[in-house]
Amino acid sequence: MPRFITHQAGRIRCRGWQVHVLCALALIVASFPAMAQAVSERTLDAGWEFRQLRDGTPTPDAGPVAARQWHRATMPGTVHTDLFDNGLIVDPYKGAPEAGLQWIGLADWEYRTTFDVTRDTRDATRSDLVFEGLDTFAEVFLNGEKVLDADNAFRTWRVPVQERLRVGRNELRVVLRSPIAKLLPQVQAMPHRIAGNYPSPYGDEPKDAMTANFVRKPGYHYGWDWGPRYVTAGIWKPVRLQSWGRARIDTLQLRQDRVTEAHADITAVATVEAANAGRYLARLWRTAPDGERVLAATQPVSLTAGVNRISQAIRIEKPQRWFPVGYGSQPLYRFDLELLDGTRVIDARGERTGLRSVALRRDPDAQGRGFAFTVNGIAIFAKGANAIPFDMFQPRVTPAQLRRVLQSAVDANMNMIRSWGGGYYESDAFFDIADELGLLVWQDFMFGGGMQPAYDPVFRANVVAEARDQVQRLRNHPSIVLWCGNNEEEIAWKYWGHGKTLKEADPVFAQRVWEGYAQLFGHDLRKVVEEEAGGIGYWPSSPSDDMAEAANTPASGDMHYWEVWGNPARPPSAYLDVTPRFMSEYGLQAWPVQRTIDHFAARDEQRIDAPVIEAHQKFMAGKGNERLLHYVRMEFGEPRDFGDFVYLSQVMQAEGIGLAARHHRASRPYTMGSLYWQLNDVWPGASWSGIDWFGRWKALQFHARRFFAPVTVAALRKEGRTTVSIVSDRTTSRAGTLRLRVMTLQGRVLRDETRRVEIAPLSASRLATYDDAELFGDASLSTTVAVFDLAADGEAAAREVVYPAVAKDMRWPDPGLQTHLRQEGDHHVLDVTAAALARAVWVDFGQVDADVSDNALVLLPGERISLRIASGANLETLRSALRIRSLADALPSDSPLPRSIPTP
């Protein structure tokens, strides 16, 4: 007999419950006869105004005088976007305005609105103001009375106001204090300070007294090496007034205890807040993926006054299971819980989920321990990238923007996204889209680096409340497969010098810092995940080996590898020197496409050391182009001009990341994940992304579609030896052929051989190893390539070209590219042919909106391809805008890149 358990105030009441419905839920709720008051809710998003406060502000005269007057505000929103919308500041993304906008983060801000309340609402047993997101130090006043002091942007704040509401007009006012001004005296008073992330170059706070890690707000607001410093504030999520008289459903969890092909065992858990003890009726509906809706359970239940937690086991026979993209479909079930007083529904809550089993396997072996995700018993090689925030100002991120980027990830054959810890917990829309697309999500808690004041129990308690809020909000999403404590904080303490320095300066304080870290990330957050996440795993940091003494090691746990790029002495080929268990970060920079650069910089401002260009290059505080140019030169030599620099940066990035990703995939099953840095951009500028802020693909994203293909070939050359492997993510075997051709750049074939291959499921199979003499014979290495083509049953053709010399040392002929653009039905088709080998072919339509079906291509001599062009422009407009180039157009060159900075 199922047992119906109500937990409240330390008491447990157990009540037998006979259930005759197969998929039954014994849930909650109280009942009162006659006039039951349903939960009513309204969103307070109208009539908001804002202004800069002068009283108590450390810089009362900063900013335009007009900012101190009341102006229209958008809700939800941020101070920066409200200022911009009212013409009080320039566009924060265009030109180089960043230094002149730092006064905003030092100012205090005030928001206000009014709303009307009826007598019924005023007389309700309970009325709550619910703030889903206040950034960050917020004082909330209702009708002149302070009702809340908030201090965490990631928490939901629920404030009872039933005795403070008036019939008729009510005023709601929110004062947002500068986090820098509020915290700076505290930080400066510390004898020894814990590590921050990126010091401000603008003087708004001292470089040796960084405040960001002391406040629970998005860390990237303080600047990162891919985004600007805009320390914004705002009411960044909706504000609601919720009134009720009997009971309300707070949460509904669908905990998946065991899911197999035969059946799914789920524990449905709900929390209900009851105003008074009483009996109610609970009714649960289940909607299958095909839309069939059935009444799963209906039952009278008793509640005590206060918070009640109810749980009930359910079984679904032959469930439609949810799989990651590439492994099956993504069916989604919906459960709707209704609470009734008699025949009247007084509250309802619905949740959607996908049924699957998930595990993080840490199997021991001779080298250490593995790191592999399994879904429905299938070992998944994680292919993807790290996602950063989609904008500096989150409220203006649209579901369409999220879907475009996440669909682009799927289109590039990715199956996992790591939601990085220096931003914010993504919106429900983000996870809904991930669920629908089959993208797995590695979810960080919001700690982006440095060290936290976790030695402070008040700080830890605030974080635990935040974590509980967020895990409860997101736990029904099947896409989430891991919760991770933080980004890079463990290795920063152990290996980056700060821990050693603090131990030498103040060993007692250093011990407190580490013990606080271990308590928060080793225990507290782990406990929250164990209690709330429904069986999803926890990992304390990335990279880590689960708090073992050594972290960021190839033998065990996950790795971040930044020796390439971080150490300019290490070329991209050094990616082949490290074989991790799971590579969760690695990356190379590139500039976005020309059209995106034109959005923020005029053509005469586009030089490597121009102020606007440096303002949109955040690595090395604006001097990152020196590092980027170093990597371009390493492979390609000196670019002729800024346009070639941009183009070659993308070629370098795409080919370098492709080399690493193929190596990781060829190392399966020792290596079981490859997530490069990074998927997307927070604004238009230079970064490690494959997709820019506008959603436009760089060369990397096109390459990712090929190197992350479900079945592909990896031909990896290191120190004169080429190793050829075939990798497959398919769960069944494939038959195919592998063709090897050695040819000159002009097209003369020196070797041509084909072999049949049997491709095992979920595998990487090494087929051959060649040294240069065996592969290329006596051919000149400056004019010869090896081409490996894989044709597998039911799969897209896969190709890898091995270049035996760096590009600048090869003798590139004019490829003789020819194009023909034609109309075909409702779209256009571009035919491209090459007379000689064309490397890094890039098709572009300038300022015309046009999506090319493939790009960043290699064409062999005599080869022809047809590309689909999606555009609203007509044929003549596209023909006029069409530009095509290849590597031969950029190499060789004796023309120096326009610059005035020294050559690194």
Image: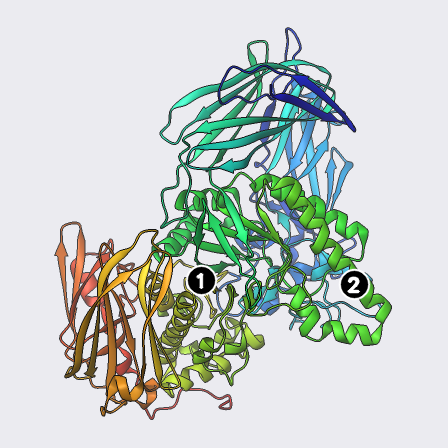
Element under disc 1: loop
Q: Nearer the viewer, residue 864 or 187?
A: 864
**Residue assigned mark 2:** 513
What amino acid is at disc 1?
Answer: Pro
The image quadrant that residue 879 belongs to is bottom left
721 in relation to 331, above or below:
below
Find the distance from the CA under tag 1 to the CA under tag 2.
Answer: 37 Å
- Residue 565 position, x and y percent, is 51, 77
Is there a contact, CB below 8 Å, between mark 1 and mark 2? no
Q: Is residue 110 visible?
A: no
Q: Is residue 533 above or below residue 389?
A: above
- Relative to 848, does residue 35 appear above or below in the rendering? above
Q: Is residue 828 visible?
A: yes
Q: Position of residue 509 (x, y in %)?
A: 84, 66
Neighbour class for label 2 at 10 Å: few (<14), some, many (≥20)?
many
Q: Determine which of the numbered discs, if any, sits on residue 669 in the image.
A: 1
Which residue appears farthest toward the top when viewing the image?
Answer: 34
